[in-house]
Image (tube, helix red, strand yellow):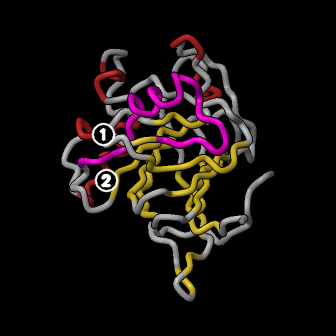
Amino acid sequence: MVFPDFTATQDAFPRRLDGKAVPRTHIIPAAHGFAFEVKKGEHFRVVDLYGEQVVDFAAWVQDTDLVEKLSMAYTRYHLDGATPAIGEYLWTNKDEPILQIVDDTVKVHDMTFMSCFPEMYAKEGIKHHRSCAGNMAEVMKPYGMSSYLGVTDPFNIFQNTPNYTLKPLGSSKPGDYIEFKAMKDCICAASCCPYDLRGFNGGKVTDVAVVTGIPAME
C-alpha cells in the first residue's frame, strides 16, 4: 500500500517542530468529513485506503471569512476543462492559485459534479442519509459556515465520471493518493463520499486518510 506510516491523530492541525510541520495522519471514517488547516508551502495528501472511494474536497483562503475559495469554474477555465496534471494548479474565485498538484497516482478526478446533498437522498426515498455537503458544513461550522448551502462546488478526488455520467467507474486502488502543495494559507475540508447507490464508490463506502505536514521533496 502506498501510504506513509505516520501516527494517526484526531487533531486538525499538524504538529510543528522547529517551525516546520510534522507528518500526521487523520483517518476519515466512511461517510464523514474532516476539516484542517495548511500553511502556504506545506504539502498534504489524500489517500484512498481501500479503493474506489470518492473524496469531495473544498478549500477556503484563511482570513477571508470563507469568501475566497477553491473554484471549479475558474480551475476549468485555466485548464480548458481538463483534469489537472501534476504541476498544475487549482484556482480560487479571485483567480489566484490556491493549491498545486505535486503527485498523483490516479490522475482521474472530477470537476463537474456538485457534492451530494440531503435532498438528493430524500428524492430517492432515503431519510437521514449523510451527504458530502452536510459533512463539509458540519466540519466547517467552527470556521463560520452555518449551512451546507455555503459549500462550494468540490474537486471530486478519485471520481471517474466521463461525459457527466454517474456510473460505478472506480478509478483508484487501495493506497492510491493525490498530494497537494498549498499556495496560500488555507482551510480545507474533505468528505468521504457517502453516495452508495447503484454501485458508486464500489457499492460500499470506506474510510480514507488525510496526511498533513509532508516534507517537500525539493
- Local crowd at mark 1 within 10 Å, few (<14), some, or many (≥20)? many
Q: Is residue 182 left or right of residue 87?
A: left
Q: Quadrant of the C terminus?
A: bottom right
Q: Earlier in the sequence, mark 2 or mark 1?
A: 2
Is label 2 in contact with label 1 (beta carbons under 8 Å)? yes
Which residue occupies the foreground of this view, 25 or 82?
A: 82
What residue would you read off at disc 2?
140
Indicate whether 32 appears above or below 161. below
Residue 176 in the image: state x and y as whole percent: 72, 44
Residue 115 in the image: state x and y as whole percent: 40, 31
Cα–Cα span, label 2 and label 1: 9 Å
Q: Is residue 101 left or right of residue 125?
A: right
The answer to whether residue 157 is magenta is no
Residue 45 in the image: state x and y as whole percent: 61, 54
Magenta extent: 67-90
Quarter assignment of residue 109: top right
Please state the total of marks drawn on the protein image: 2
- Local crowd at mark 2 within 10 Å, few (<14), some, or many (≥20)? many
Identity, as a three-letter code, of the amino acid under mark 1:
Val
Q: Is residue 3 left or right of residue 57?
A: right
Indicate whether 199 appears above or below 99. above
Which residue occupies the foreground of this view, 57 or 201?
A: 57
What residue would you read off at disc 1?
151
